Amino acid sequence: MSENKKQLSSNKDQMINLGSVFMDVAKEWLMILLLTASAAIVAHVGMGRLRPPMYASTASIAVNNDNPAADLNNSAGADCYNNMTHESKSALLLVDTLQSGEMKAAVAQEMGTPFSGSISAQVIKDGNMVRFTVKSRSVRTSYLEAKAVLRCCDKLSDALFGGTEITVLRAPRAQDSPVNAGSNRKYVIAFAGLVFLGLCGLIALRSCLRETVRSIAEVDRKVDAKLLGAVAHKDKLIGAKGGSLITDPAVNPQYAQDLRRLAARISNEMSRKGQKILLVAGAGKDEGRSTVAAGLAMAMAEFGKQTVLIDTDFRHPSLHKILNLQDSKSMDLGNWLEKGSKAGDAELASMAQAMLCPVPDSELVAILNRKAAPQAMEKHSDLIRKLLGRLEDEADFIILDSACVDSYSDAEELANMADTSVIVVRQHHSEMRNIDEAITALGGRERMIGCIFNDADKNGLGANTVGKAYGY
């Protein structure tokens, strides 16, 4: 029984892996399309040089016996048969003559220019009729060369086909479209197809070689942090407008439910340990860290907990966009830090109140950053610590949204100020080495509540990542 369970688990992981590979390829559809189109253009130009367009002019002629002796005895069956045999043999000889180098030389001499094309001929239905085609690089040239072939046949008929005469059944007719356009198109399509498959194969190979967390089952096996839970993608309901917060009716109900469940679990554990300040971190960009931090804070506020959400991502602040507070009149944290470095305690307290921004339709209070301040942590870490100490006396929980760990040291410094932290790991996104380094920078498993597996596909079909970034 246990072996069967292991086999089923292995099969499910393999299916998820294949799904994530497919999604990685699908994410690069625009690049694949552009490179394939470029390859098709290059192939078209190359084929135009290697196999330039050829135009054809076709004519039909007949070989007839003009031997008077044969005409006198035309009533005799044997002579009639011999006459037909002679014409058939003459037609075959004419085919060989038309396709010979001597004919090309004769046409060149007739026209006074080098013969640039080709001549092909065939007997029609084993009789005395011959159809020939002259191919050249232009419609006009192919037509003129076909006319020259007829004139040369008249001149050579007596010398080569004694006792016969050549009759034109169909004058040369030129084709306006290239005769080799179809074959060139096939080569172009084949080359573009190979490029398309090659690009898909390279992206798929790169996806297979990437060491990421591809499924919920892999979190415990790969991530050195306790799995707190998984959050589904925040897809909006069909036809709904707006909505990325858990309080918005347009957001995916599963996504909102997952965040509320996680908020309850985290707040209970923090309350049990007497902790108030939680840092929400992520190894790299686009993990969905800011969105998760906003969702957890709003859920805790719904539980009746006095919660303050602070945007301490001084590199790429985004909470004001997620919370739809771009037009808020509250003071930014970055401005408070700049002014606070020269202010006294009383003025600091007054300015701190000016930073508090109530979030509409929620009991949540936020402290925002609308402009990047890259050096804020290095210059004002003492002020940030002082602000957290002041808020800690008044709030039940303080949620910090930080910059990504793998690019900056801000999160590591904030982890020393916070009571505990969670790391957000997005399905099949960051490399495992970056996740491991981020956990170490945050103080290791002992100092963390655990890991939140974000953007999770709970149906086992691969990560939902096509065109769905979290707007870092």
Image: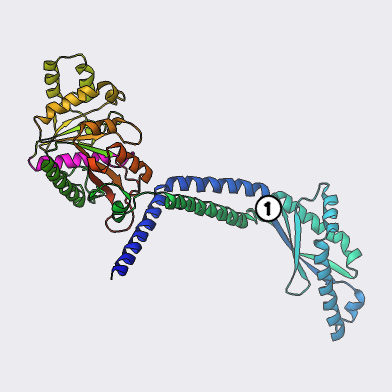
Which residue sits at x=12%, y=45%?
268
Judging depth in this view, the residue of 122 and 382 nearest the camera is 382
269 or 107: which is nearer to us? 269
Q: How is the image coloured?
A: rainbow
Left or right of 295? Residue 49 is right
Main secondary-structure element of the magenta-colored stretch: helix
Direction from residue 403 to residue 21 in the image, left or right? right
- The quadrant of the rendering that contains the N terminus is bottom left
173 w.r.t. 72: above or below: above
Does the stretch in magenta take in 283? yes
Q: Which residue is mark 1?
A: 54
The residue sitting at 82% across, 78% down in the picture is 84
- Residue 311 falls inside the magenta stretch: no
> Along the line of sight, which residue is nearer the eye, 47 or 59?
47
The image position of residue 361, as x and y in percent, is: 11, 38
User: Which residues fall within the magenta stretch?
Assistant: 282-304
Q: Residue at x 32, y 36 (%)?
A: 405
Q: Quadrant of residue 396?
A: top left
* Position in image of residue 205 (x %, y %): 46, 52
The reply to whether residue 384 is in sight is yes
- Residue furthest to the front in view is 446
Asked if one can make out residue 332 in the rendered structure from this viewpoint, the answer is no
Quadrant assignment for the C terminus: top left
Left or right: where does residue 440 sit relative to residue 255? Answer: right
224 on left or right of 73? left
Question: The disc labelled 1 sits on which kind of residue?
Answer: Met
Q: What is the total number of numbered labels drawn onto the structure image?
A: 1
Q: Within 10 angstroms of label 1, few (less than 14), some, or many (20 or more) residues?
A: many
Give the secondary structure at mark 1: loop
